[in-house]
Amino acid sequence: KFIPSEFGVDPNKIQIYNLAHRFYAGKTEIRRLIEAEDIPYTYICCNLFMGYLLPSLAQPGLKAPPRDKVTIFGDGNAKAVFVKDVDVAACTINAIDDPRTLNKTLYLRPQGNVYSINELVAMWENKIGRELEKIHVLEEELLLKIKESSYPDNLEMIFIYSAFVKGDHTYFDIDECGVDGTKLYPHLKFTTVSEHLDTLV
């Protein structure tokens, strides 16, 4: 069985395909080649690793969560998914010989790992005991910033737009071509977003 090194958003479901400068095109091309050659596969979509965007609460250019003001993109309600890299590895190991994952897309959406930016900010405020100043950036404003910047410098904003404005991680239900890894492997304990943010307080 072949498991391509994707471990991100499902390139078949992405709504910003043409915005990402062929970032997803290579992944879809590899998928089509695998399927055309009848190679057994499992595609694993964990969306975002916890070490990316979460430590900054999705604030471009920051390396740590803000403690004074925070930018909310769009309406702030689209939900993103964050999974710790070791938890993705554990799921991958379980999926290798599992016939239920044969020629399927394995999605990881642990209950404690799916949050909107509004929810992340509220959680962070609760942890630090302080309310942050909210700066709202509309979808059109973010798109303009992305287009005014050059690739790959704008990649972080593209991922923020994809996850927290378009909702590319969660806008769709898992269909017959996919399986839910958290349901297949209930014995696995996933590090939650809240647990990860505790390490940043």
Image: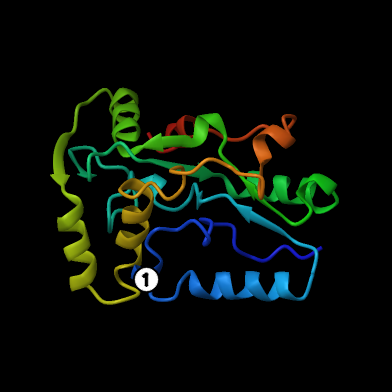
**Left or right of residue 106: residue 61:** left
Q: In terms of depth relative to the viewer, which is nearer, 127 or 59?
A: 59
Query: In the rendering, at what x and y percent does residue 134 appear?
Result: 15, 37
Q: In terms of depth relative to the viewer, which is nearer, 169 or 155?
A: 169
Q: Residue at the spot x=86%, y=51% of the render?
A: 97
Q: Residue at the spot x=18%, y=33% of the render?
A: 132
Placement of 45 over or under 83, stated as above or below? below
Q: Residue at the spot x=45%, y=72% of the render?
A: 23
The coloring applied to the image is rainbow
How many marks overall? Answer: 1
**Left or right of residue 38: residue 167:** left
Q: Secondary structure at mark 1?
A: helix
Query: In the rendering, at what x and y percent does residue 145 appear?
Result: 18, 64
Quarter of the figure with residue 19: bottom left
Placement of 159 over or under 83, stated as above or below? below
**Left or right of residue 39: residue 110:** left
Q: Amino acid at mark 1?
A: Asn
Label 1 neighbour load within 10 Å: few <14, some 14-19, many 20+: few
Q: Which residue is mark 1?
A: 18
